[in-house]
């Protein structure tokens, strides 16, 4: 006898199908109703090459031309009706998160009970997007369709993308599935980690040294010594919860400010130095932007870059370039980007023959820089060489690779990226 006869079908947590979504429009006129749904739409519209195809795709979605949608890791598939009787098979592909990305997501979610509560309530806190890059950046969505139109995307793929935003509105776990993990899998792991964290927090701590008030008041001799200061925690504390309120500042901005204050206070207690006090407003803005993954590509970091750049009368491109320099070498890397200088002759003059001996093309010198049509090395005041790259003859230099005291090593690292 087959023991599986009559058994219930096994639930597949990594495959979900959704019936045709009824046409509707958000109250503010946008296609999606949530910030993450609109971020998904932004990723589509920022990549599209033809606004007319986007408009037709949006109209198709609004008129219900998209049939049932199936979502699996890295793929969204549906049949979309066009001008011909037979619908077209249309899909949107996107990169799934790797194990490191999911570890960051799960760690951040379980670190704050309000994050878990928000996820259970089908809400996505901005902070989770900021640390993991869950939402697609421009270029992450790759459309494909059986229709003869070679537009990027065609109107059928655009329609599917718009309708997928409505699925995300209703259930953000659809986004998590697109990125590689199912709802039950995520909830089980959140439950496990939350239980482990709660157990660790309830472990009995050693008693704190104290002095009884009545002992101090009854003492007639010299003043009793105070207890030693509390031990420094391993890491800065978490900020308070800032629920969204139309009349209040952006909760993501408040979270960022509170996190920054906690980190600076922790560093000051540990070292006696404020790591930010000596920075200029521009350096501090670059440092803040560099601390957020995504390089300004995700919806949350794009907003952060816009606000920081606007506050300092710079462009988001200026800030993105400065962030690349900061990640390359901190404040010194930013100085190398922005401040040409005249180095002493010795190390600079030895660099060109060393590069020629390593079979690299001839570099032309200017102040602290050695350049070809598309490669550049800049000598920092710290004695390190910093690699830069540009499209040929464009003079649009971007920091690349890691700094190195040897110009050949810096160039080799640049070319290996």
Image: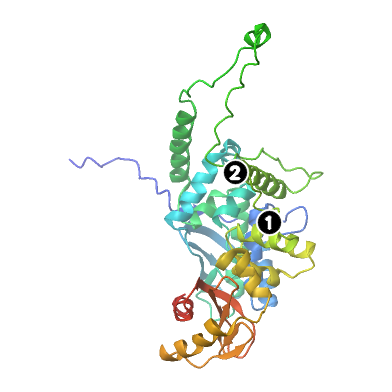
Residue occupying the point 70% across, 77% down: 52
Q: Of callouts 1 and 2, which one flags the residue occurring earlier in the amino acid sequence?
A: 1
Left or right: where does residue 207 sit relative to residue 165? left
From the image, which quarter does the N terminus lie in? top left
Q: Position of residue 204 (x, y in %)?
A: 46, 22
**How far is disc 1 from disc 2 in space, using C-alphas?**
15 Å
Residue 415 in sight here: yes
Give the quarter of the image for residue 408: bottom left
300 or 96, which lies in front?
300
Instruction: Report the coloring of the rendering.
Output: rainbow
Left or right: where does residue 216 sit relative to residue 141? right
**Residue situated furthest left in the rendering:** 1
Q: Position of residue 189 (x, y in %)?
A: 44, 41
Q: Is residue 260 above or below residue 31?
A: above
- Give the number of the disc on residue 117: none
Q: Position of residue 27 (x, y in %)?
A: 77, 52
Q: Is residue 382 above or below residue 115?
A: below
- Identify the element where label 1 is drawn: loop
The answer to whether mark 1 and mark 2 are in CB contact below 8 A is no
- Identify the element where label 2 is drawn: loop
| Residue under pointer 2 | 122
**Residue situated furthest front in the rendering:** 221
365 or 71, which lies in front?
365
| Residue under pointer 1 | 32
Residue 87 in sight here: no
272 or 176, which lies in front?
272
């Amino acid at each position: 006898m087959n023991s599986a006869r009559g058994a219930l079908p096994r639930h597949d947590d990594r495959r979900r199908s959704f019936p045709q979504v009824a046409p509707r429009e958000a109250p503010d006129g946008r296609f999606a109703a949530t910030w993450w749904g609109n971020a998904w739409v932004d990723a589509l519209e920022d990549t599209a090459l033809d606004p007319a195809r986007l408009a037709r795709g949006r109209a198709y979605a609004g008129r219900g031309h998209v049939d049932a949608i199936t979502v699996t890791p890295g793929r969204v598939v549906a049949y979309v009706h066009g001008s011909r009787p037979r619908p077209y098979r249309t899909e949107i592909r996107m990169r799934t998160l790797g194990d490191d990305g999911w570890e960051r997501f799960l760690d951040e979610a379980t670190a704050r009970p309000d994050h878990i509560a928000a996820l259970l309530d089908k809400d996505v806190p901005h902070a989770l997007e900021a640390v993991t890059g869950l939402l697609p950046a421009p270029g992450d969505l790759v459309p494909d369709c059986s229709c003869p139109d070679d537009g990027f995307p065609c109107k059928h793929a655009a329609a599917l993308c718009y309708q997928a935003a409505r699925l995300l509105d209703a259930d953000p776990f659809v986004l998590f599935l697109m990125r590689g993990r199912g709802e039950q899998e995520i909830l089980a792991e959140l439950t496990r980690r939350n239980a482990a964290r709660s157990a660790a927090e309830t472990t009995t701590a050693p008693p704190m040294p104290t002095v009884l008030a009545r002992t101090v008041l009854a003492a007639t001799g010299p003043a009793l010594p105070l207890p030693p200061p509390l031990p420094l925690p391993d890491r800065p504390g978490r900020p308070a919860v800032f629920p969204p309120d139309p009349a209040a500042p952006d909760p993501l901005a408040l979270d960022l400010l509170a996190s920054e204050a906690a980190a600076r206070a922790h560093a000051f207690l540990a070292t006696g130095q404020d790591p930010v006090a000596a920075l200029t407003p521009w350096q501090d803005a670059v440092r803040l932007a560099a601390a957020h993954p995504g390089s300004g590509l995700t919806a949350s970091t794009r907003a952060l870059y816009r606000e920081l750049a606007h506050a300092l009368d710079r462009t988001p491109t200026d800030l993105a370039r400065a962030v690349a320099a900061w990640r390359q070498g901190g404040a010194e890397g930013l100085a190398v980007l922005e401040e040409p200088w005249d180095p002493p002759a010795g190390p600079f003059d030895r660099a060109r023959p060393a590069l020629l001996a390593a079979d690299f093309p001839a570099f032309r010198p200017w102040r602290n820089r050695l350049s070809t049509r598309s490669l550049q090395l800049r000598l920092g005041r710290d004695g390190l060489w910093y690699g830069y790259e540009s499209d040929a003859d464009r003079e649009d230099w971007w920091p690349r690779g890691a700094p190195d005291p040897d110009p050949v090593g810096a160039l080799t690292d640049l070319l290996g990226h």
